[in-house]
Image (spheres, coloured by chain):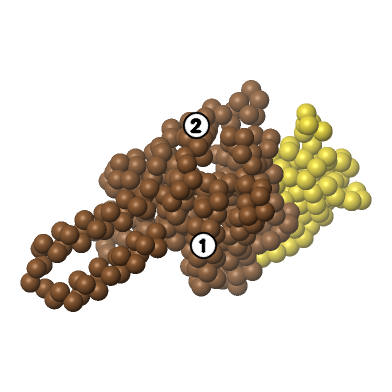
Chain colours: A brown, B yellow
Amino acid sequence: MSKQTWLKNASFTELTPRERLDALLGGSSRELLGPFARVSSPWLALQGLMAQTDDGVIVGTGVFAERPMVVAAIEPAFEGGSIGEVGGTKIATMLELAAESCRDGVPIAALLLIESGGVRLGEANLGLSAIARIQRAIVALRQLAPVVALVAGPTGCFGGMSLAVELCSQIVGTKHGRLGMNGPEVIEQEAGADEIDSTDRRQIWKLIGCEARLRDGFIDFLAEDTAESVATELQKAFECPLRSPQRIADAYQRLLQLREAQRGQDESNSARSYAKSNEQIDTEGQRL
Amino acid sequence: MEEFRMTFPASQRVRRRAHVGVVSSGDLELLLEPGNADEAIVVVQTKVSGYRKIWETLLKRFFERHAFIVSVEIRDGGATPGTVWLRLEQGMELAVEDRADE
């Protein structure tokens, strides 16, 4: 059995990030700043942690569905797929360069394979600032070319990176993936096991699994756990017309409905605070 | 955290560099490059201190069986000797395999 046949039929979520890129892009994928470039986090050793030579982030270029694109994949096994200064900067710079190329008349799309617990707490503001840069870069690029995110595996996508994913043009998930702001483990640790039992997989996936997220309009496509199915759904995602994500418009609509509902409920409350929050919602809406 | 460098006699050449594994609990990251002269150079960085003797024994035995002239860098997240051996074999396999595209 050739490597490509094996990759096609294997469980997609059990592949390493490099194998996933291989399975989707075939021979066209080319890694940039790979492990031998030895661009790793300078902060981990100071905390007694072992750094990895690619900082857990693989970036490169490739062709998918006949479109040239930049690609990134996060290694969830390294530090929970957390985003530190180096890994975050790799993704952000890649997206910024793609946008620059689009403005120069050579359209480059982006494919982000995101499995991340969010910011790497040990790199604090540097990680947060890198995530902010990623988010800004996604918003800039999605006006010029499709930016598609894939949330495949059980590590899921949380914190700042869940916000980054929601900013993308389209989001594809598999039923093994999960997506949310605070992960169940964090909620349990902070609010107790009565609030949520993070070991109750059935309940967790019913709440924040990608199947539930598709139903509730937080992602756009759901794939089976094979490279072939993932590729099919990604292809649909890249073929969508270029416009501001429908999810965001829908979320804005939901906010408006909430405002109406709340207005009916609390007629007696101070009108001024409503006027103020309405104003906020309107400015947000215009910005979107 | 501990770091050490070891050399072993070697005689066979490899074709290319290879990268396998990941720094995570029970695993390691291994970077392998074709070496110079007649030796294998291994630099180990490990999270778990106090096991130098075991590393030495394992690596000595490995390079007696697979005497490749390589420069190896290991970043260990606490791999068991069995995992270390498998990762080394995996790296060597990638470094010597025939490829259609070459």
Q: Is residue A20 above or below residue A190?
A: above
Which residue is depicted at the point 34% across and 61% down?
A285
Report the chain holding disc 1. A
Report the chain holding disc 2. A
Tell me the residue that label 1 is attached to: A136
Which residue is depicted at the point 20% across and 62% down?
A259
Q: Position of residue A191 (x, y in %)?
A: 27, 64
The image quadrant of residue A47 is: bottom right
Tell me the residue that label 2 is attached to: A232
The image quadrant of residue A209 is: top left
Amino acid type for the residue under numbered disc 2: Thr
- Towards the viewer: B23 or B101: B101
Query: Could you classify mark 1 by the number of other residues whose Cα lies within 10 Å: few (under 14), some (14-19), or many (20 or more)?
Result: some
Kindly report the distance in space between the C-alpha atoms of the residues bearing marks 2 and 1: 28 Å
Amino acid type for the residue under numbered disc 1: Arg
Q: Is residue A120 visible?
A: no
Q: Position of residue A143 (x, y in %)?
A: 51, 53
Query: Could you classify mark 2 by the number of other residues whose Cα lies within 10 Å: few (under 14), some (14-19), or many (20 or more)?
Result: some
Dot 1: element:
helix
The quadrant in which the C terminus of chain A is found is: bottom left
The quadrant in which the N terminus of chain A is found is: top right
Q: Is residue A21 visible?
A: yes
Q: Position of residue A7 (x, y in %)?
A: 58, 31
Judged by depth in the image, the label closer to the viewer, 2 or 1, is 1
